[in-house]
Image (spheres, rainbow, N blue to C red):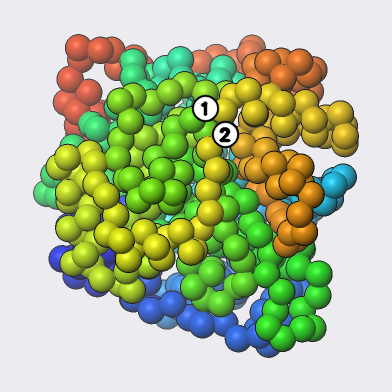
Amino acid sequence: MWYISTRGMAPRVNFEGALFSGYAPDGGLFMPEELPQLGIETLRHWSTLSYPSLVKELCTLFIGPELIPRDVLNDLIDRAFRRFRHREVVHLSRLRNGLNVLELWHGATYAFKDLSLCCTAQFLQYFLEKEKKHVTVVVGTSGDTGSAAIESVQGAKNVDIIVLLPQGHCTKIQELQMTTVVRENVHVFGVEGNSDELDEPIKAVFADVAFVKKHNLMSLNSINWSRVLVQMAHHFFAYFQCAPSLDTHPLPPVEVVVPTGAAGNLAAGCIAQKMGLPIRLVVAVNRNDIIHRTVQRGDFSLSKAVEPTLASAMDIQVPYNMERIFWLLLASDSQGTRALMEEFERTQSTSLPKELHSKLSEAVTSESVSDEAITRTMGRCWEENHYLLCPHSAVAVSYHYQQTNRQQPSLPRCCLAPASAAKFPEAVLAAGLTPETPEDILALEFKETRCTPMRKGDDWTLMLRNTIEGLSWQQRAQS
């Protein structure tokens, strides 16, 4: 299995190459050169599998035994999920009025990113140990990626991790999950800016190809193919849990509602769809609605500013995984994708070509949800089910309630729940409800913290480069 850049100007790489690269050298994102097509018999067989077994099947298709032998791959994935709190790893809650909520948040940091990052970290360490190498991982976060990435590699001898978090733009719990990990290989910076602004110094550092190579840098943001690969399993599992029967021909469709910011989970769903999974995708966003405008009107352009919302992890202006979706819908036309993305990067605004917009609106429907609708949804779900939703999950469930209010027949529907309400007590209180906080989250308040400020007026790119150079120097001194 080979991977090529969405922009077509970089050499193809194998899974290991895609894993360690993040962005391709031409600024594009890696995608499989070919997508395996799954027949009905394969889907029927997969429908009997557990979530971890689905991850194993998908990873086998996209990694290849010459890189990681099948038995080793199985062990790595078992190890990745060992610390999850739920024995099924992910769990479907069937609630009133046809509401199905797929809980993707039973990992260490109570967010869906634990699922893909735990696996990605295992793959990473497998290759590093085999080749006796060291990497420095650089991550920008809007809230959940940072803590899940830290959790997945903390204490690892062959990995240093640098995380930039947007000070004051995450919840207190999200921040503490990062700043309380006082380990030698964990380096957290609190940036006086939002998540789009902190991406700038990271992009600047990764644009210096010689520097990246010299210091063995990589990213674990959702641009990393390995994360998208594992996230495909959410869609397969959601489908198999909610499809009424797999005995019919063709197989019955299921609607999957995906709350998203950077569109990683959405890209994973589009790939699953292209492989033959009969899902209809609904993308649900908060007031930062660039994806909604793109689906509805073909308007792929930045707003004046990021609007802070209750669903803070989705307060993102640049949904970089949309590039993967455009490339898929353009039938792997890298020239068309490159022209579109370069225009967007140059002008921060572009209109999708008519044909691409029409394909996108066929593949995906969309909804944008206000803070008021988020709290109303959280309140209704509690009232009807005694079930607490996090604000991001409420963005998806809000769409479900809109549809049921219309009282028209609809497909079976599954709402992806990316985080536990326990991480967002402020939003739970805003909905007039009582937060339920687990012991391990309460304990964060009393732990030692470590975080280096990046203030407005500082040269963030220089600070980041200096940190990376310092870590490389330390690494050389130890080896």
Name which residue lies at 24% across and 32% down.
Answer: 200
Q: Which residue is mark 2?
A: 369
Q: Amino acid at mark 1?
A: Ser
Q: Quadrant of the N terminus?
A: bottom left
Q: Quadrant of residue 355?
A: bottom left
In this view of the protein, which residue sits in the foreground, 104 or 132?
Answer: 104
The image shows residue 448 at horizontal and vertical percentages of 55, 14
211 displayed left or right of 109: left
How many numbered marks have been drawn onto this rendered protein structure? 2
In this view of the protein, which residue sits in the foreground, 166 or 102?
Answer: 102
Name which residue lies at 17% across and 51% down.
Answer: 342
The image shows residue 208 at horizontal and vertical percentages of 13, 44
Name which residue lies at 73% across and 62% down.
Answer: 411
Q: Is residue 297 above or below residue 267?
A: above
66 displayed left or right of 420: left
Contact between marks 2 and 1 (CB within 8 A): the answer is no
In this view of the protein, which residue sits in the foreground, 124 or 131?
Answer: 124
279 displayed left or right of 64: right
Q: Which residue is mark 1?
A: 312
Depth check, mark 2 against mark 1: the one in front is 2
**Secondary structure found at label 2:** loop
The image shows residue 281 at horizontal and vertical percentages of 57, 58
Q: For residue 137, say whether it is visible.
A: no
What's the distance in space between the residues labelled 2 and 1, CA to CA? Answer: 13 Å
Q: Is residue 141 above or below residue 21?
A: above
Q: Quadrant of the C terminus?
A: top left
**Secondary structure found at label 1:** helix
Q: Amino acid at mark 2?
A: Val
